């Protein structure tokens, strides 16, 4: 078998194949990076809203305790918890 030098069209097709593979890799990397960023932002938003809700709940309890005696406030809180459990 005689070895010949590569034909220009063969070199061009190999180059096109390598560039296409590289392009697909870059596209995949971009898409996974974008998905990771979206997931992080959604998770951060969820945690922020949970912390905000917890702060509001503590503030509400403090307001309740400042208006009525502690034993009545405990009854109100317990009633609200039971009511919430029954509606779920």
Image: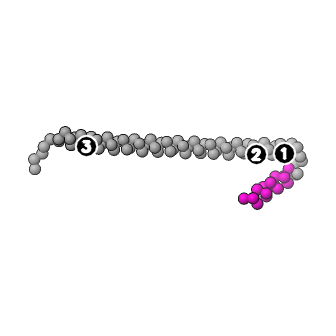
Q: Number of callouts in the render? A: 3
- The way the protein has been coloured in the rendering is one colour
Residue 9 picture location, percent across and down: 20, 41
Mark-to-mark CA distance, 3 and 2 = 65 Å
Residue 70 picture location, percent across and down: 87, 49
Which span is picked out in magenta? 73-88
The 10 Å Cα crowd at callout 1, few under 14, some 14 to 19, many 20 or more, is: some
Horizontal side, residue 4 vs residue 13: left or right: left
Residue at 46% in and 43% down = 31
Residue 21 picture location, percent across and down: 33, 44
Asked whether the residues under the numbered discs 3 and 2 touch, taking CB atoms below 8 Å apart as contact, a structural biologist would say: no
Residue at 79% in and 44% down = 60
Mark-to-mark CA distance, 1 and 2 = 11 Å
Earlier in the chain: of badge 1 and badge 2, it is 2
Earlier in the chain: of badge 1 and badge 3, it is 3
Q: Could you tell me what secondary structure mostly forms the magenta stretch?
A: helix
Q: What residue did someone put label 1 on? A: 64
SS for callout 1: helix
Asked whether the residues under the numbered discs 1 and 3 touch, taking CB atoms below 8 Å apart as contact, a structural biologist would say: no
Q: Nearer the viewer, residue 27 or 69?
A: 27
Residue 80 figure quarter: bottom right
Q: Which mark is residue 57?
A: 2
The question of residue 47 being in magenta is answered with no
Q: What residue did someone put label 3 on? A: 14
Q: Nearer the viewer, residue 32 or 16?
A: 16
Residue 51 figure quarter: top right
SS for callout 3: helix
């Amino acid at each position: 078998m005689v070895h010949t030098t590569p034909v220009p069209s063969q070199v061009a097709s190999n180059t096109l194949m390598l560039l296409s593979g590289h392009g697909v890799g870059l596209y995949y990397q971009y898409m996974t990076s974008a998905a990771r960023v979206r997931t992080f932002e959604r998770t951060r938003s969820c945690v922020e809203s949970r912390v905000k809700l917890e702060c509001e709940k503590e503030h509400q309890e403090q307001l309740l305790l400042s208006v009525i005696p502690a034993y009545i406030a405990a009854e109100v809180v317990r009633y609200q918890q039971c009511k919430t459990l029954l509606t779920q």
